[in-house]
Image (cartoon, grey):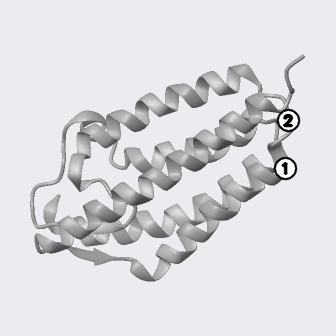
Amino acid sequence: MPDASLPALLFLAFIVVQRLSELVIAKRNTARLLKKGAREVGASHYPLVVSVHVAWILSLVVLGYNKPVAMPWLYIFAGLQIFRLWILLSLGSRWTTRIIVLKEPLVKRGPFAFIKHPNYLLVALEIFTAPMVLGLFPVAFLFSGINGAILALRIRVEDEALVDLR
């Protein structure tokens, strides 16, 4: 009989590899944007964002490595990955984990034609959904609340920085 924790471990490995890959892409894109004359805003709260995401992932790993996978929640999470891909493809080389302001027109294609901050919506949904895949209700609610507070600050800072480009 296969190990019951294998699906949870594969799910967690996916999240870790995905987030590490995104950091590599974000770092590359940030460097390119800054080289083009863009500027970063909100850098002072970026370490808090990273710390919360690291704590979220660690809580998933520590508390969820041996949990059964709830398939309905996994399907929702998989659907969110399609949304993620749409966002990444729409932003292209302008996608980053930091708030980088480039004096060029804002992206208005893809989900940005319908939603003001689709990437923040995606992250909020993932922070809730991933723990639910592993039945970690307290983690889903705790980190959703923390992330919501951070996003309130982050969206305000980003909106203020982009006011001239809207």
The residue under the point 43% across, 28% down is: 82
Q: Which mark is residue 112?
A: none
Q: Which residue is mark 2?
A: 67
For this view, does 118 lie left or right of residue 152?
left
The amino acid at mark 1 is Leu
Compute the Cα span from label 2 to label 1. Answer: 8 Å
Across and down, in percent, residue 107 comes to 18, 47
Q: Nearer the viewer, residue 89 or 159?
A: 89
Task: Tell me the amino acid under the disc marked 2.
Answer: Lys
Contact between marks 2 and 1 (CB within 8 A): the answer is yes
Q: Residue furthest right?
A: 1
- x and y, in percent, of residue 32 in the image: 19, 65
- Circle 1 residue: 63
Few, some or many C-alpha atoms within 10 Å of disc 1 (few <14, some 14-19, many ≥20)?
some
Residue at 28 percent across and 66 percent down: it is 30
Near-viewer residue (129 or 164) = 129
Whether residue 109 is situated above or below residue 26 in the rendered picture: above
Q: Secondary structure at mark 2?
A: loop
